[in-house]
Amino acid sequence: MANKKEDTKPKLKMAVYWGAACGGCCVSVLDVHEALFDVVAAADLVFWPIALDTKYADVEAMEDGYIDLTLFNGAVRNSENEHMAKLLRQKTKVLVAYGSCAHMGGIPGLANFTTKEEIFKRVYETSESTVNPDKIYPQPEFEVPEGKLEIPVFYNDVRSLGQVVDVDYYLPGCPPQTERLVEVFMAIVKGEELPPKGSVVGANVKTQCEECERKKSDNKLIKRFYRPWQIEDDGETCFLEQGVICMGPATRGGCGVRCIKGNAPCRGCYGPPPDAPDPGAKMMSAIATMIDVNDPDEIQKVVDDIDDPAGTFYRFSLPGSILRRKMT
Amino acid sequence: MKRYTIDPITRLEGHGKIEIFCNDDGDVDNVYFQVPELRGFEKFCEGRPVEELSQIVTKICGVCPGCHHMASGKAADAVFGVEPPPTAKKIRELFYMAHFVHSHIAHFYALAAPDFVVGPTAPKAERNVLGVIAKVGKEIGTEVIKQRRIAQEIQALLGGHQTHVVLNTPGGVRKGLTEEERKDIEEKAKGFVEFSKFSLKIFNDVVLQNKEYVDIILNGPYSLSLYSMGLVDDNNKVNFYDGKVRVVDQEGSEHCKYAPNEYRDWVAERVEPWSYLKFPFLKQVGWKGFVDGKDSGVYHATPLSRLNASDGMATPAAQEEFEKMYETLGGKPVHATLAMHWARLIELLYSAEHCLELAQDPEITGTDLQAKLDKTPKEGVGIVEAQRGTLTHHYWTDEKGLVTKANIIVGTTNNNAAICMSLKKAAQGLIKKGVTVDDGILNMVEMAFRAYDPCFSCATHSLPGAMPMMVNFRDLDGNILRTVKRN
Amino acid sequence: MAEQEQRIGVYICWCGSNIAKMVDVEGVSEQIGKLPNVVIAKNYKYMCSDPGQDLVVKDIKEHNLNRVVVAACSPRMHEMTFRKALQNAGLNPYLFEMANIREQVSWVHEDKDFATKKAKSLIAAAVRRVSFHEELDKRTVHIDPAVLVMGGGISGISAALEIADAGKQVYLVERSNRLGGRVADLDVTFPYGHSARQLLEPMIKRVEQHPQITVFTECKVEEVFGYLGNFECKVIGKDGKETGIKFGNIVVATGLKNFDPSGMDNYGYGKLPDVVTSVEFEKMLRQGKIETKEGKIPQNVALIHCVGSRNKDIHEYCSRTCCMTALKYANQVTAALPETNVYDCYVDMRAFGKGCEELYANTSRKNVMFLMFDKEDLPVIKKTAAGDTCNMVVEMNEVLSGEAIEVPADMVVLMVGAEAHEDAKEVAHAVGVSMCGNDFFIEKHPKLDPVATTTDGVYIVGSCQGPKDIPDSIAQAGAAASRILATIAQVEVEVEVTTAVVNEDLCCGCQTCIKVCPYSAVTYDEEKKVSTVNEVLCKGCGTCGSTCPTGAIRSRHFTDQQIMSQIEGLMAMEMEVA
Amino acid sequence: MSFEPKIVAFLCNWCSYTGADLAGTSRMKYAHNIRIIRVMCSGRVDPTFVLKALREGADGVLICGCHPGDCHYHEGNYRCLRRYHLMQKYIQQMGIESDRLRLEWVSASEGKQFAELVDEMTEQVRKLGPSEIKPVMEKLAV
């Protein structure tokens, strides 16, 4: 029955777009390698700025809901990102926040530790290689002798896609493991029943430890924390049990524990497990609980080993966290 | 005054926008290339542990993450005042060569070849990678995909990810190489060498044997007389991972040769209010505006500039091709923008050869992967050659190794001014009164742009690619009279 | 839960005027009535009264409420009361939440507007929380009828007998080599002068011969494992001999020890030969001869109260029995040595309890001089020069006369107070009871539940809970015994249901939670590769829940969702009325 | 209208909540600014709760548990103490004044100490002024 339906079904209309992203997500789409042929067979790419020359105007001309599936990667950092997010939401049936940045803000979201002013000042004024005596900053609108030039407005805060428009699904990862994308894509193509709106797809419900092959025990008692280079990793014992902070326990599986396979602790790009009210607090709680001293001063000493808690527990999710940004 | 908006990806979608202003005679008056993106890594890296940065900065660019990973890793080494042990250094280089092979293959076949193999003015429908495959045969097309994938697999094997690698740690690497893995990579590297030679043969047969193409390459609109920048080893041979930065002038004589920590003596960046991307220039020469020539500090950092700035290639086969190119194009240095494609293939061959050398080096399977970190971290600069230009990372830290300041000059940024000028020159040469601006013309303009393989993931963050183009013919009030679109 | 239609009833108690005088109960119920899902919001004079509870029951049935909030006193006071009311109305008792607007609002604030505003937000929070409450079903465990009694003093003995007489096996473990405890040291008891020996000996005999009682002397109990109904432990003898025993309930009756005054310079104990403690004096009485070290009849005997008690540097508490013991001595001395003057130096004469005030009255009619001193200004005992009429004087500022006086003394009896045993901590740890600041064990509730502890199945009786006289100790022993017999009679008991539970679909097996549990209730299942909670061992502290990095562990009745919604409710109302 | 701080407090059932009740039964008066949430043990207090309270507009958050050694569940208060130290470091990194979050030990018999604590912290937070977190969040909201 499903097959029959498939035969008669028109090809899926698909779009891929990036907001404030690095392009890695788009590469991950290209990296479907052979599966690319299945994708092309099943879908018409109606909008993909890397590869196609469909114009913004063309997208605007589409009727609402014309696009069946949009993979939106990247965070929302400026007026252009926001505009496109809203436009694509309007034109798309199933909008997927694709990758860590769209999911929870990602690495660009670390900019919420600072402000537009501080960033401009650093990049355009105080940067050691910059010569800018007149303190010229880029302007959204600027009159050159020949006419007016425009560039998008740079916002003070980074937001995740879901904080700007209504998102149907989240497909996490920095970048998402290509196999996960193909699975989700095929599920949609085959018209399989999709999980409830707002769900995370293409990632496991269980966190990294389930897949991690390192030796684990209940010996999660930590007398001091180490930076990765401060220990000689034996290559086989749970990082936490070696005193190195690993986001694995609080990070969804699905990536194939790729960082850990590279002997690096999990960095958390796949985001928190279902229903986590805050992406970092649970791990913070777990880590603190592991501290194996009771004297306040000794506890403080151990805590001081954690040099950058906010940047560690919210590495990919600062905008998506309860506090969202640094108060200034 | 007429105003043409060549909007590679229109502003609201866009990641790079070209404004062409013509005078009333219809001749090009001025051209602006605008970059609408900024993310501020230099600021928000502050406060992070320095070893974190080699993972964080790969997110500057998902197209050449390996380059940022390497530059950052080297900066971190410098911050701790250590050199990785030989094995670690070689593993890094091995990874990096694979990264170059993967990137250069992609660029030549997917982006450059269509213009030459198929033809710059050939019908749009054929002027793409499929057209290339049609011309050179399907099995080659499959080979292209295969080689690119193999190169990525090597990166994934060494770096965990194939994109955002986790290989480097201050003073070393996280993972060694087993003998089996080495053997496997050795075989793959042999394949790279063969494939690179084959690619050069295609270039030779299809491009160099075709007078029309050679003309295009040497033809005016596509040449600029700029300073050339590139990383070289102790013998002034091209090196991507290590060495000093050498800059030669328009005649090929050395302007400077600086160690990474000296970059600020030679390079400065300028800010324009109409673009988020800064404009680097040679500090000692100074900024004279968007003009070429010896008095202008504008330089380029590309495969061609790297070859211009060097005395040759460090591997035999690549050296041969190096000599052949300069012979064919009338001696060093070459200023023909389109020669960058040739230079890129020579670099591909070098990467492949060096990849093989490293895979055959007995030291590559050593177990000493990490230098001892006993000095107090302070400050360090790391410089590598990214596919798209010299990449500089500079970090300052407190005594715990937490970053207090960071400064980054990414590959494509070096070429920001040069790209503006190439576009202006191409536009001036091609868009004239009476000339119908059609798809062919636009592609010819775009070719100037594409030659730089501009990775605006790094700089603006659009990916290198066949860029959609559109020209609006507007009246004085800016109303669109006619629109020409590619395809 | 939350998707089911919410029908919440809210009841605001006046508590007479206790709440109503400081909180505008009318206004509150009107505003709360407007909250989403609130079907009715009423206020009533006494919610805990029968009519108050009937009101709830009636409404549940009439308006088929499925959630109830009562805003009244502390849940520690009446949560159980209202849960029962829900049960009577056929509603699961856990679909209830209480807002504390008396102890934490009306009794502690003075501005009616602010108090009313605060009450509103507390109730709004309870309303938001209760809609996420889940039905929880009581669970039961079988009870091993055997009982462990720790301590062979009068309390332990009576508890053991009560239980054994009911036909249940008792293990009585005494650390010394004899039964009887402190009482065995006594000559006669106050206020009626019964002979301690005559009280005690028949009891001890019965214990030793009782078929249902196994006595271990010179033994101690090693750490107790298990939970109500199913405890076990090892009993270790002096010879190191181990006996494993199983039992369902525990009576802790480890008693107390007497204070050693050597450390108090003003009394010169240990230096002045005729300064003795009440313990030593008691011994003289048992032996029937009151005489100084030189074997002379003392002409003047001074009794000094509150030695080591009611002293901010030693023990602030009152040791309860010393005052009456002193009166007992006064009577015994005047009876045995009519010529001897007795000086009773006291702080306050504490003569509560049956027959005690009478004892005081009688004694004061005898040849006993009562002298009062201030507990901040202790008497000092000095040796007198040779050839003086007495060999010591007690220098004190007499409060009633306001004069500094010297009391002649040939013998001084220090009425030493009581304190907890040094090893009280070990005992507490072994059986899992808490201790208060002065190392006596803490009862579950100082008023409502004085013999139970916060660990189900563990009871504290006699002076290990605080200094007591014999009748009080025996009363407690009886109380504990009947509580235990009652639970045994139920064959099974209900255990804590607000426990932690692991969602196996979420648990990644990181094992962070295992070592966190104080009761070893969380273990790792090697088969399934997930953690599991033994819900009988779990006491519902919720620490594992807030430790779990995946959110796989839920703390029933204190789930993240319930607490977060409570915070939302609290602040939402805050903002609205702010 | 003058600024009235809003303080959310998490009290453990056995010591601190009972201590607060004692303050009530002894009719001690203290600042009305505190809103108490009961948990069985201070070890149950998840950093998420603290962040949530701040996010929802609390100007201060107070956590109270049994004195060290007196925890009804043996060590829950120590778990809480460890989390408190890490949370402090986190919120300070997020630009939140450390005085907005406090952990104090209050036993069942310390009604007086509890009342004094509430008054003292209320004044402390009053001096800090209103928390900017909620306003900032509303500005960021879609």
Image: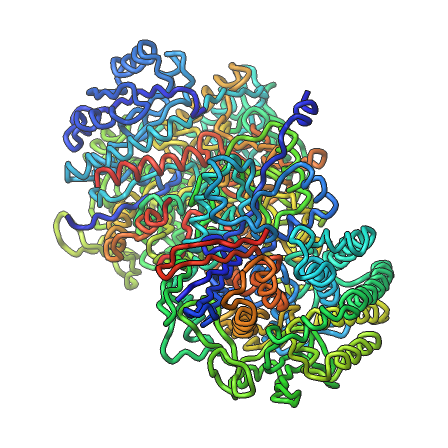
Residue appearing at x 39%, y 62% in the figure: A116
Q: Would you place residue C387 above or below residue B249 in this image?
A: above
Q: Is residue C221 visible?
A: no
Kindly indicate the quadrant of the structure image that contains residue C378: bottom left
Q: Would you place residue D39 above or below residue B406 in this image?
A: above
Q: Position of residue A125 (x, y in %)?
A: 41, 74
C493, B71: nearer the viewer = B71
Left or right? Give the position of B247 relative to D99: right
B399, B142: nearer the viewer = B142
A173, C192: nearer the viewer = A173
Q: Is residue A31 visible?
A: yes
Q: Position of residue B36 (x, y in %)?
A: 46, 61
Q: Would you place residue C173 above or below residue A87 in this image?
A: above
Residue appearing at x 27%, y 29% in the figure: C73
Residue appearing at x 61%, y 43% in the figure: A45
Residue appearing at x 50%, y 38% in the figure: A92
Kindly indicate the quadrant of the structure image that contains residue B235: bottom right
Left or right? Give the position of B390 relative to C75: right
Residue extending furthest front? B434
Q: Quadrant of the C terminus of chain D?
A: top left
Q: Position of residue B138 (x, y in %)?
A: 81, 50
Kindly indicate the quadrant of the structure image that contains residue A224: bottom right
Q: Position of residue B314 (x, y in %)?
A: 78, 78
